[in-house]
Amino acid sequence: MSMKLRLVLHNIRSVYNVGAILRTAEGLGVDEVIFSGYTPRYDNAQLLPHLRAKLNRQIEKSALGAENMVSQEAVTDLSAWLVQSQLEGWKIVGLENNLAPEEEAQKVLLGEQKYDEKTVLVLGEEVAGIPAEIRQACEYFLEIPMVGRKESFNVSVAAGIALWGLMQKDLLAHKRS
């Protein structure tokens, strides 16, 4: 049985982070990347042509072709989209290390999470993280263990680690076949 994984990029500021995440998502078999908030989107038809071309070039620098390989969708109301996803059987998981005290009990160490067939992984803004109203939809929050003095990884690095941890079972099974 193969895991289905959607990746939400909410309010990611850096086009280079977006490109790197698209490349990682494609390489690890993410089914779809969802853009919300002010996250820069590849080939955004709402932008003027010269701005779209500039943004596309920047994303392409780190995506290296993955921007054309992974399925993408932009949503305007992420809260409603997450509710609909839950109704369709998707588990909503946040990648967040800046939790409120009452949310700490929902923290699960990466590698100790249960295997869900349909998972939505939500990433938030590089500094502020996932907004409180979006965190409310999360069933649990993944924690990436760290031993250094820094409190967090760059969002694109954290995305890669979390995606690998979530999909490791499927990736290793695929490698063996």
Image (cartoon, grey):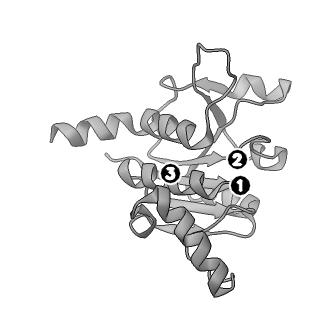
The quadrant holding residue 40 is: bottom right
Q: Residues within 10 Å of mark 3 (few under 14, many from 20)?
A: many
Q: Is residue 86 visible?
A: no
Q: Is residue 70 above or below residue 128?
A: below
Q: Residues within 10 Å of mark 2 (few under 14, many from 20)?
A: many
Relative to residue 14, is residue 129 drawn left or right? Answer: right
Label 1, label 2: how many angstroms apart (C-alpha)?
Answer: 9 Å
Please tell me how many numbered marks the rendered image carries: 3
Depth check, front residue: 73 or 39: 39
Label 3, label 1: how many angstroms apart (C-alpha)?
Answer: 13 Å
Q: Which mark is first along the chain, 1 or 3?
A: 1
Q: At 83% across and 49% down in the image, what residue appears? A: 133
The quadrant holding residue 107 is: top right
Depth check, front residue: 102 or 84: 102
Residue 175: x, y in percent? Answer: 21, 39
Depth check, front residue: 45 or 133: 45
Q: Amino acid at mark 2?
A: Gly
Q: Which residue is mark 2?
A: 124
Q: Which residue is mark 1?
A: 13
